[in-house]
Amino acid sequence: MSDSSTSRRRVVVLGSTGSIGTQGLDVISRHPELFEVAGLAAGGSHIRLLAEQAVRFRVPVVAVAAGGAAPSLREALDALGGTRIRIEAGHDAVTSLAGSDADVVLNGITGSIGLAPSIAALQAGSQLALANKESVVAGGHLLFDAQVREAQINPVDSEHSAIWQSLRAGTHEEVSRLVVTASGGPFRGMTRRQLRDVTPEQALNHPTWRMGPVVTVNSSTLMNKGLEVIEASRLFGIPPERIVVTVHPQSIVHSMVEFRDGATICQASPPDMRLPIALGLSAPERLGNVAAACDWSTAASWTFEPLDDEAFPAVSLARQCLAASQKHTAVLNAANEQAVHAFLGHRLSYLGIVDTVKAVIDEMDAGLRSAPLFESVEEMERIEDEARHRADDLIDRAE
Ligand SMILES: NC(=O)c1ccc[n+]([C@@H]2O[C@H](COP(=O)([O-])OP(=O)(O)OC[C@H]3O[C@@H](n4cnc5c(N)ncnc54)[C@H](OP(=O)(O)O)[C@@H]3O)[C@@H](O)[C@H]2O)c1
């Protein structure tokens, strides 16, 4: 890592056209004295935006995962005067860019396709500002084994960033429990019966955060919280039974750490992902003027309530998978991605999402338990493919 007092940190932004990526670039744009963008990567569905970003931040190279998008990206770059910007195409190009020895790699890719780039960044010795929770949930030990030194991962998910910040208050031995907060999503307070007819349009309407479609649906089913419990357990080395989920609709307290003397330390701020993203880029220092702080001049209430596990069974399913094996959590994530896509395509009911995931896990359970660790990323991808196929079969049969 270069010394930020003498030279700018070179940042690679993966998933630059998405919610995390655009907010990451917004943070970077406010601190040109601290950061330079060494490369951008995206999937290929927002070519014009990707070209504009590349020209604006004067990046030398852009990687686009969809190889077929390279000609239109070239055209868009040339039209904006970015004729000297190099294009690398294909998923391997995204992974190579991630492993190109930047100071920091911000991974804002959605899905476990983000694992190989995360591993490449760690192996290259870069600091990994990790929003892509699937790297932890699906990859597990494959991700952590790739670290070449201690503390190479800067959590960007707001809950994990909050825990990371709160952990500064004590030692690992002094931690009693992690308390992960959940907004409760748009359907908080509804019964399972009331959730039967939820439409994609309703599920995409998150009350406090603006995120990509899969993440937004995951927030509404609370599967996102389930994935976050898995992520928290693995990132901070705390077993699942010492991780509590509490529903906090205001989304001001982003998570907490309870210490053995009874003290609970939290991180609070109005919802704005730029805060954890900025810390992910600048840690251990904090940047100035990143996001608004709490307004103490007006009355406010922060409420906390227990999670309704019957209406939202995703968290307990995630806990079971976490306790079972690394492979179970990868299957949970892959089957869920498939089910969410089917729901967004009006092929599956809302309650069918978590029901399908559970059915896939039940079908694969015995095989997963017989060899619980992955040999390689390729093996993980094979198991994910199987989970997706099984989810599709179940969905097709139910149609
Ligand atoms: N958004 C949030 O507030 C938030 C909060 C916490 C954690 N997270 C996590 O952060 C990750 C990203 O979430 P998001 O909401 O930013 O998702 P998003 O808005 O859907 O953006 C995903 C980004 O990934 C790009 N992408 C897709 N496949 C790619 C590939 N193979 N290689 C390189 N880039 C690829 C997309 O490019 P194109 O669209 O141009 O194809 C897009 O730029 C997820 O893991 C999510 O759980 C998000």
Image: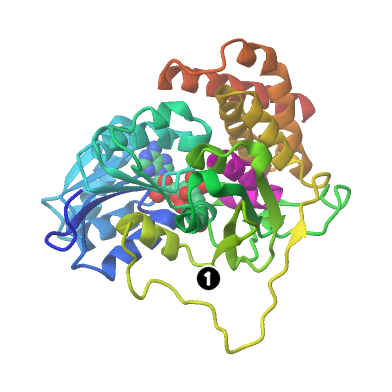
Residue flagged by tag 1: what amino acid is it? Ser
Q: Which residues are magenta?
A: 215-231
Residue 19 location, x and y as percent?
A: 45, 57
**Residue 173 as seen in the image, left or right of residue 148:** right
Q: Residue 231 lies in what quarter of the image?
A: top right
Q: Is residue 45 visible?
A: no
Residue at 58%, 19% in the rendered image? 386
Tag 1 residue: 269
Q: Secondary structure at mark 1?
A: loop
Disc 1 packing (10 Å; few <14; some 14–19; many ≥20) = some
Residue farthest along the right direction in this orientation? 193
Q: Classify 230 as above or below 369.
A: below
Task: In the displayed orientation, state which residue is furthest to the front.
Answer: 261
In-image side of 85 versus 319 (left or right) = left
- Say left or right for 3 vs 218: left
Determine if the magenta segment contains residue 298.
Answer: no
Front residue of 50/167: it is: 167
Residue 351 is situated, as x and y percent measured from the top left of the image, at: 78, 42
